[in-house]
Amino acid sequence: MTQPSPGMSADLKTIIVLLGFGLAAMGGCSRGPAVQYVEGVVTLDGKPVEAAIVSFKPEAGGLAAAGTTDAAGVYKLNAIGTGAAKAGGGTVPGDYLVAIRKWEYPDPGPAPDPADAKAYAEWQDRSLKASRREPTYITPKAYGDATTSGLRATVKQGRNTGEAFRFDLKSK
C-alpha cells in the first residue's frame, strides 16, 4: 500500500488507512474450498488406537487432511490450509491415500534438578540419544506412509462416516 504524502488532507489520509484495513480484513476472511465432515475409527488387532495420526493425501494432488484419534480410536479430519482448523472441520471431496501412524521414542526419564549439574548433563545426554534413535512403532511402520499403507478413502459431499472410514489395522 502506498503511504499518504505529508501534504494530503487528514480526511484523505483517514480514507486511505481505512481502505487498507478493509482490504487486509477481506483477505483474512477467505473461507477456502468447501469442506465435508469426515469421522472414522482406527483399531489395531481389534482394539482402538489412541493418539494415532490419520493423514489423508489426495490422489490427484491438492489439500491434505489430518486428524488424531481419541481414546475410542475416533478421528475427525481437518483439511490443511482451508481455514477449517476447528476439530472436525473436514476436507474437500475426492479420492485419498491414507496413512496412519503412532510411535513412541524412548523415555529418558524425568529431568533432575538443574542445580545438580552432573545429573542434569547426564539426563540431557540420555534425552539427545533417545531422540536420535528409531522410534518404537505402535502401528506397523508400513501404515505410516500413504504409498505403502494400502489404505484408501473417498470423501463425498455431505457427512462422511461409517465403515468406509474405519481402518482395522493388523500388527502382522
Image (cartoon, grey):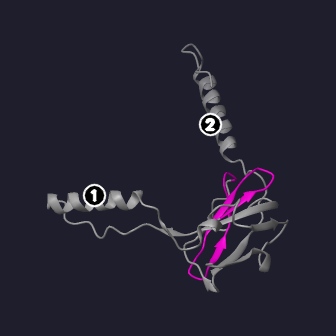
Magenta residues? 55-82
Asked whether the viewer can see residue 41, the reply is: yes
Badge nearest the viewer, 1 or 2: 1
Give residue 21's mark.
Answer: 2
The amino acid type, in three-letter code, at marker 1 is Asp
Residue at the location (32% across, 67% down)?
Answer: 108
Residue at the location (65% across, 61% down)?
Answer: 145
Q: CA distance from mark 1 to mark 2?
A: 50 Å
User: Is residue 67 located in the magenta-colored stretch of the structure?
Assistant: yes
Q: Quadrant of residue 109?
A: bottom left
For this rendering, which residue is in front, 63 or 109?
109
Q: Going by the image, does 20 lie left or right of 36?
A: left
- Counting from the top left corner in percent of width and height, residue 8 is at 59, 16
* SS label for mark 1: helix
Q: Residues within 10 Å of mark 1 (few under 14, many from 20)?
A: few
* SS label for mark 2: helix
Give residue 64's mark.
Answer: none
Q: Going by the image, does 10 lie left or right of 134?
A: right
- Counting from the top left corner in percent of width and height, residue 167 is at 71, 76
Residue at the location (28% across, 57% down)?
Answer: 125
Q: Which residue is mark 1?
A: 125
- Counting from the top left corner in percent of width and height, residue 68 is at 59, 69
Q: Quadrant of the C terminus?
A: bottom right
